[in-house]
Protein backbone atom coordinates (compact mmCIF):
# COMPACT_ATOMS: atom_id res chain seq x y z
CA UNK A 1 0.00 0.00 0.00
CA UNK A 2 2.82 2.36 0.89
CA UNK A 3 4.54 1.69 -2.43
CA UNK A 4 1.30 2.29 -4.29
CA UNK A 5 0.75 5.67 -2.60
CA UNK A 6 4.33 6.71 -3.24
CA UNK A 7 4.16 5.61 -6.90
CA UNK A 8 0.87 7.45 -7.40
CA UNK A 9 2.27 10.56 -5.81
CA UNK A 10 5.41 10.46 -7.98
CA UNK A 11 3.33 9.84 -11.14
CA UNK A 12 1.13 12.86 -10.35
CA UNK A 13 4.18 15.06 -9.72
CA UNK A 14 5.79 13.91 -12.98
CA UNK A 15 2.58 14.56 -14.92
CA UNK A 16 2.22 18.05 -13.43
CA UNK A 17 5.84 18.83 -14.29
CA UNK A 18 5.36 17.59 -17.88
CA UNK A 19 2.29 19.83 -18.25
CA UNK A 20 4.35 22.82 -17.19
CA UNK A 21 2.72 23.16 -13.80
CA UNK A 22 4.93 23.85 -10.82
CA UNK A 23 6.24 20.73 -9.11
CA UNK A 24 5.03 19.87 -5.62
CA UNK A 25 7.19 21.44 -2.93
CA UNK A 26 9.39 19.39 -0.62
CA UNK A 27 7.22 20.36 2.36
CA UNK A 28 4.17 18.80 0.72
CA UNK A 29 6.13 15.70 -0.19
CA UNK A 30 7.26 15.29 3.45
CA UNK A 31 3.72 15.84 4.75
CA UNK A 32 2.32 13.27 2.33
CA UNK A 33 5.04 10.76 3.23
CA UNK A 34 4.30 11.26 6.96
CA UNK A 35 0.57 10.89 6.28
CA UNK A 36 1.20 7.67 4.40
CA UNK A 37 3.25 6.39 7.36
CA UNK A 38 0.54 7.41 9.83
CA UNK A 39 -2.14 5.63 7.79
CA UNK A 40 -0.13 2.44 7.57
CA UNK A 41 0.69 1.84 11.25
CA UNK A 42 1.79 -1.74 11.52
CA UNK A 43 -0.35 -3.34 14.28
CA UNK A 44 2.49 -5.75 15.14
CA UNK A 45 4.83 -2.84 15.84
CA UNK A 46 2.16 -1.15 17.97
CA UNK A 47 1.61 -4.35 19.96
CA UNK A 48 5.35 -4.88 20.38
CA UNK A 49 5.64 -1.35 21.76
CA UNK A 50 2.74 -1.96 24.17
CA UNK A 51 4.29 -5.25 25.32
CA UNK A 52 7.59 -3.50 25.99
CA UNK A 53 5.80 -0.84 28.05
CA UNK A 54 3.92 -3.49 30.05
CA UNK A 55 7.12 -5.44 30.67
CA UNK A 56 8.75 -2.28 32.04
CA UNK A 57 5.74 -1.73 34.32
CA UNK A 58 5.88 -5.33 35.55
CA UNK A 59 9.59 -4.96 36.28
CA UNK A 60 8.95 -1.79 38.31
CA UNK A 61 6.05 -3.40 40.22
CA UNK A 62 8.24 -6.41 41.06
CA UNK A 63 10.94 -4.06 42.36
CA UNK A 64 8.39 -2.27 44.53
CA UNK A 65 6.97 -5.59 45.80
CA UNK A 66 10.46 -6.78 46.73
CA UNK A 67 10.94 -3.60 48.80
CA UNK A 68 7.60 -4.10 50.58
CA UNK A 69 8.42 -7.75 51.36
CA UNK A 70 11.86 -6.75 52.63
CA UNK A 71 10.32 -4.08 54.90
CA UNK A 72 7.68 -6.55 56.15
CA UNK A 73 10.34 -9.14 56.98
CA UNK A 74 12.42 -6.55 58.81
CA UNK A 75 9.37 -5.44 60.81
CA UNK A 76 8.39 -9.03 61.64
CA UNK A 77 11.93 -9.85 62.80
CA UNK A 78 12.05 -6.76 65.01
CA UNK A 79 9.05 -7.84 67.12
CA UNK A 80 10.18 -9.07 70.55
CA UNK A 81 9.42 -12.70 71.45
CA UNK A 82 9.11 -14.47 74.77
CA UNK A 83 11.20 -17.49 75.70
CA UNK A 84 9.41 -20.81 76.24
CA UNK A 85 9.36 -20.30 80.03
CA UNK A 86 8.31 -16.60 79.69
CA UNK A 87 11.29 -15.45 81.78
CA UNK A 88 13.09 -13.69 78.89
CA UNK A 89 12.23 -11.38 76.01
CA UNK A 90 14.31 -11.59 72.84
CA UNK A 91 14.55 -8.97 70.09
CA UNK A 92 17.14 -8.01 67.47
CA UNK A 93 18.77 -5.77 70.08
CA UNK A 94 19.33 -8.73 72.43
CA UNK A 95 17.81 -10.84 75.17
CA UNK A 96 16.45 -9.33 78.36
CA UNK A 97 15.68 -11.06 81.65
CA UNK A 98 12.16 -10.20 82.81
CA UNK A 99 12.49 -11.25 86.46
CA UNK A 100 10.63 -10.68 88.75
CA UNK A 101 7.94 -10.27 86.07
CA UNK A 102 7.10 -12.62 83.23
CA UNK A 103 7.20 -11.88 79.53
CA UNK A 104 3.89 -10.77 78.01
CA UNK A 105 2.94 -13.34 75.37
CA UNK A 106 1.01 -10.75 73.34
CA UNK A 107 3.64 -8.02 73.07
CA UNK A 108 6.72 -10.23 73.53
CA UNK A 109 8.07 -7.70 76.05
CA UNK A 110 8.66 -7.98 79.75
CA UNK A 111 5.79 -6.88 81.94
CA UNK A 112 6.52 -3.75 83.96
CA UNK A 113 3.85 -4.30 86.60
CA UNK A 114 1.50 -7.00 87.79
CA UNK A 115 -2.23 -7.34 88.25
CA UNK A 116 -2.10 -10.87 89.67
CA UNK A 117 0.58 -13.26 90.93
CA UNK A 118 0.39 -15.09 87.58
CA UNK A 119 2.23 -12.05 86.10
CA UNK A 120 5.22 -12.79 88.36
CA UNK A 121 7.98 -15.41 88.15
CA UNK A 122 7.71 -18.44 90.44
CA UNK A 123 8.69 -17.61 94.01
CA UNK A 124 7.34 -14.04 93.83
CA UNK A 125 3.89 -12.65 94.50
CA UNK A 126 2.10 -9.63 93.14
CA UNK A 127 1.60 -6.78 95.59
CA UNK A 128 -1.65 -5.64 94.00
CA UNK A 129 -1.71 -2.37 95.94
CA UNK A 130 1.38 -1.10 94.12
CA UNK A 131 1.38 -3.50 91.10
CA UNK A 132 4.82 -4.91 91.83
CA UNK A 133 6.15 -8.50 92.01
CA UNK A 134 7.87 -9.10 95.35
CA UNK A 135 9.52 -12.03 97.19
Image: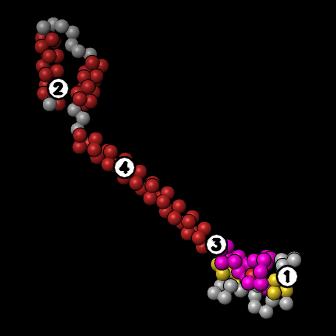
Residue 94 in the magenta stretch? The answer is yes
Q: Earlier in the sequence, mark 3 or mark 4?
A: 4
For the residue labelled by badge 4, is the local secondary structure a helix, a strand or a loop?
A: helix
Task: Tell which residue pokes out farthest to the bottom in this image.
Answer: 123
Query: Within 10 angstroms of label 3, few (less than 14), some, or many (20 or more) residues?
Result: few
Kindly identify which numbered label has been placed on residue 54. Answer: 4
Residue located at (40% from left, 51% from top): 56
Of marks 3 and 4, the one in the foreground: 3
Give the residue pinned by disc 1.
Answer: 127
Residue 118 seen anywhere in this rendered image of the structure: yes
Above or below for 73 versus 60:
below
**Magenta segment range?**
93-118
On the image, numbered disc 2 is attached to which residue? 6
In what element is the residue under mark 2? helix
Alpha carbons under labels 1 and 2: distance apart:
100 Å
Any magenta on residue 36? Answer: no
Res 41 → quadrant: top left
Looking at the image, which residue is at 23% across and 29% down? 39
Per the model, the C-alpha gap separating discs 4 and 2 is 35 Å
| Mark 3 vs mark 4, CA separation in Å | 38 Å
Residue 127 located left or right of residue 29: right
Q: Which label sits in the foreground, 3 or 1?
A: 1
In this figure, which residue is indicated by the disc labeled 3? Answer: 79
Q: Above or below — where is 50 with respect to 72?
A: above
User: What whole-number distance in Å separates the C-alpha atoms at marks 2 and 3?
Assistant: 72 Å
Amino acid sequence: MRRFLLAAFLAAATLMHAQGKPAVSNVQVNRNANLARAIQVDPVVVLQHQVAQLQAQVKELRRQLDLVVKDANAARNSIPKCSADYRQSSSPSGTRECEPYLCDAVSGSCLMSCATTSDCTPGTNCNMEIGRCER
